[in-house]
Image (cartoon, helix red, strand yellow):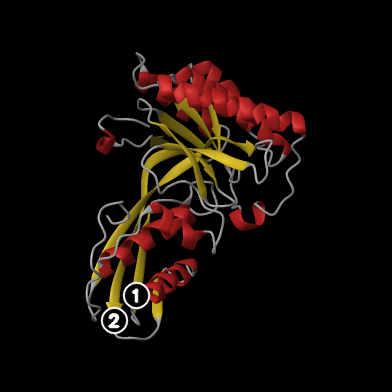
Amino acid sequence: MSGGTGSVAEPRPSHPGVTGVGSAFGVFGELLQGVLPEPDGDFLVTLPIARWSVATFRGAAPGRITVRPRHKTKTLRLAGMILADAGHPMGGEITIESGLPEGKGMASSSADLVATARAVGSALGIPLPPSRIESYLRRIEPTDGVLYPAIVAYHHRRVALRAVLGTLPPMTVVGVDEGGEVDTVEFNRIPKPFTGSDQREYARLLERITGAVRRRDLAGVGEVATRSALMNQALRPKATLDRVLGVCRDVGGLGVVAAHSGTSLGILLDPARPGHADRTAAAVAACSAIAGDVTVHQCLSFDGMGRRGC
């Protein structure tokens, strides 16, 4: 996929029929999300999972750009920006194939846009490193940190990387969807109710999870994720949180992760612990009594970083 930071390549000549493909992973909510005691302090810490959005761009003679599915109109705006900046008066078609449900807190829109940018860049033969893609995305909407193959702290409202935290040993997520959808753009317009004391706690939690990821401490990560889910009840409460926390305790989970701006909660499980399959099955059964839509996800492995991780 394009979007790396290699040497600058000469753009390919534009012509009808040029094709590029790009992809981006999604997330299961956030390990941590809140507001830091600093200007524009909104931030999140990503939890990448093994689900993707894949975009294919097929160039055509100058004219309109279309997209399938037709409602993914933000990708048209992004593609138009990239083509205009590259000096390619090209039309074409974008096709999005995604395993990420919309409005649930799994970064479906961010993944669609990043995959589209990479597809257009691939078709044109131009490098699109994360910083360049971010320059386009911040003109469109708040964005998750799915540009980076790691767990990252990210300023989603201003579309800027804060820090790469690293990777973790594999984790399983048993997800519970409470139903409905959340518009991320509208959600980010809601005034945050967090006090100065809350903001200072978020700063301490960011320090804790930074250290936990560095130490590959899954228990520490789970504790921070649970605290963040509880603090988010002041902003977008989850009706099933207490019951999901009870299931987590019963099955010996690491903690509960929330889609802070979505509709889902997840129980974090350690596959390295004995009896993992039985504990996962028990969590699925118990969560199915709470909500009808229960799914199981695996945290993403970043082999390119030299080790498997979440």
Identify the residue shown where x is 54% and y is 64%: 139
CA separation in Å, label 1 and label 2: 8 Å
The residue lying toward the viewer, choosing from 266 and 88, is: 88
The residue lying toward the viewer, choosing from 140 and 28, is: 140
| Residue carrying label 1 | 93
Q: Is residue 27 above or below residue 117?
A: above
Q: Is residue 181 above or below residue 33?
A: below
Q: Secondary structure at mark 2?
A: strand
> Is residue 130 something one can see in this rendering?
yes
Residue 70 location, x and y as percent?
A: 45, 72
Q: Is residue 110 above or below residue 145?
A: below
Q: Are marks 1 and 2 in contact (CB under 8 Å)?
A: yes
Q: Left or right: where does residue 91 sit relative to residue 256?
A: left
Q: Amino acid at mark 1?
A: Glu
| Residue carrying label 2 | 60
Residue 7 location, x and y as percent?
A: 25, 55
Residue 172 location, x and y as percent?
A: 40, 29
Q: In which image quadrant can residue 264 be found?
A: top right
Q: Secondary structure at mark 1?
A: strand
Residue 185 location, x and y as percent?
A: 61, 57
Q: Mark 1, mark 2: which one is toward the viewer? A: 2
Q: Amino acid at mark 2?
A: Ala
Q: In which image quadrant can residue 166 be found?
A: top left
Q: Is residue 239 above or below residue 283?
A: below
- Name which of mark 1 and mark 2 comes first in the sequence: 2
Image quarter in which the N terminus is found: bottom left
Identify the residue shown where x is 72% and y is 31%: 198
